[in-house]
Amino acid sequence: MREAEASAIAHRRERRHSRAPARTAAQRMKDCLTFPLRALTLFHDDRWGLSSLASERFDYVSREVTGYCLDVGCGRHNRFIREYLDANGHGIDVYAYEGLSDENVVEDISQFPFKDGTFRSVTFIANLNHVPRSLRDIELAEAWRCLTPGGNIIVTMGNPVAEILVHKVVALHDRLFGTEHDIDSERGMDEEEQYYLTDSEIIERLKRRGFADIEKKYFWTQWGLNHLFVGWRK
């Protein structure tokens, strides 16, 4: 990494990270009651006073972030880092999605371009299943390397049935209405990717890479059909 980039990262790392305002109890209740509607229509953008599925995931994950954060598979516009962590972090992806700069795109995702212990948190938001099977342990090992001792990893994953249905609904919505919500179709699916990972596989891979005190937390506003895992580098 160039010296200027390393200096910028070090500077941002010292900033006190701030999260987007948490949803109020009233908003969370409204989101919970309207979950079926949101699951069929609100994939990335908030509308009608309701939270999109993506915004909701970011909200849950941001509560677990403890400091300067690496978002692996950041997607379009690097939204999680920019909007939910006040730019206190760095997003990377293998695909040059809209809104990403050169520093966000990493050709070899099995070798993160950061020094050991650069980050306090590493996130895989709804995408560990899209890491090719043969590279999952390698990427998780890189996440471990880039974390400071005492840092955490956050991985979100939906219920298997829900994950398959949502992928199919999003693809159908794009075909019917000419939208471009399905970023997986935009990038193209590798044969080693999957629509979901089981909880047991996620936990096993995290433990194999050295993460401890792994805890599962449900998204109750999505009726428990989505959840996240938090693990720690001791």
Image (spheres, rainbow, N blue to C red):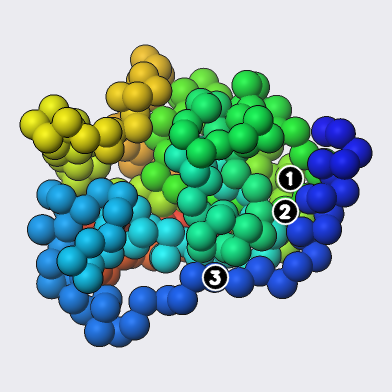
Position of 73 compared to 165: left or right? right
Indicate the amino acid at tag 2.
Phe
Label 3 element class: loop
The answer to whether residue 165 is above or below residue 184 is below
The residue drawn where x is 68% and y is 45% is: 144
Q: Name the side, left or right, on which 186 lies relative to 109.
A: left
- The residue wearing badge 2 is 119
What is the quadrant of residue 32 in the picture?
bottom left
Please tell me which of labels 2 and 3 falls first in the chain. 3
Q: Which quadrant would residue 223 be assigned to in this image?
A: bottom left
User: Which residue sits at x=66%, y=54%?
Assistant: 89
Instruction: Quote the CA–CA distance across marks 1 and 3.
Output: 22 Å
The residue carrying mark 1 is 146
Q: Position of residue 202 (x, y in %)?
A: 45, 43
Local crowd at mark 3 within 10 Å, few (<14), some, or many (≥20)? Answer: some
Q: CA distance from mark 1 to mark 2?
A: 6 Å
Q: Nearer the viewer, mark 1 or mark 3?
A: 3
Q: Which mark is residue 19?
A: 3
